[in-house]
Image: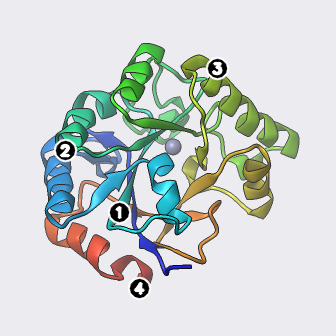
Amino acid sequence: MQNIKIPILMYHSIESMPKSTVMRSLHVPPRRFDFQMKMLKLLGYQALSLKNLKPYLDGKKQGKVVGITFDDGYQNNLINAVPILLKYNFSATCYIVSENLGLSNTWDLDKGITQRPLMTIDEIKAWLSFGMDIGGHTQTHTDLTKISIKAAKREINTSKGDLENTFNTQVTDFCYPFGRFNELISDLVKESGYLSATTMERGIVKSMTNRFMLPRMPINHRTLPHLFLAKILTNYEDRR
Ligand SMILES: [Zn+2]
């Protein structure tokens, strides 16, 4: 098998936020996101959703590719990121919390993190209609390592089934809430029929990487152009 080296980028909110915002780092201003996508295009990369990335991860297709992921399903992903992704003919995966459709990031309330609206059912349908993809992010965005196995199974399986029924699409990619997982949890995700799972571990995906423990590259407010390029083009993330 060909040696692969594929970066998967991790975004949350694509929006300009005031300096006072708690965890402002999770918000990437649209202009900066546009610049990053333009860089990828100019460098000859194709940015893809996890579903479109799969043949490359499996070594069945070769090419300069990057995975694009958005955690939680923020409304601003549809409003601000989709037009930019379409401009460069890119696709992306948005990880959806199945019981918070149309609500907000309620799991962050106790941390004082700014509440942002999440996509409604119709907005997720619009996201899909633009050729974007969705993945599972549990029912309630709970730390799966802190609940019973039975409850973890329900969070993983029920959210997958609910998303597939509501949106009439196959949901094959999963993302661990808060990046929290262990071997048992990753086995449960595998058994549920998912084909991949992303973490918050940092690094680049290689041929040997476990498909249910995929590392990513966090792109946030502080990711200035030179750092963005270093993440994509060098082994910067692996050396950290
Ligand atoms: Zn999340």
Mark 3 or mark 4, whichever is nearer to me: 3
Q: What is the secondary structure assignment of the residue under circle 2?
A: loop
> Counting residues from the N terminus, which is met first, the one under dot 4 or under dot 2?
2
Callouts 4 and 2 close, C-beta under 8 Å? no
| Dot 2 amino acid type | Pro
On-image quarter of the C terminus: bottom left
State whether residue 98 is above or below residue 19.
above
Looking at marks 2 and 1 on the same chain, the residue that comes earlier in the sequence is marked by 2
Q: Secondary structure at mark 3?
A: helix
- Residue linked to disc 4: 239
Asked if marks 1 and 3 touch (Cβ < 8 Å), the reply is no
Mark 4 burial class by Cα count in 10 Å: few <14, some 14-19, many 20+: few
Cα separation between marks 1 and 3 = 30 Å
Q: Which residue is mark 1?
A: 65
For label 1, the SS is strand
Q: Which mark is residue 165?
A: 3
Q: List x then y, in percent, for residue 228.
A: 23, 67
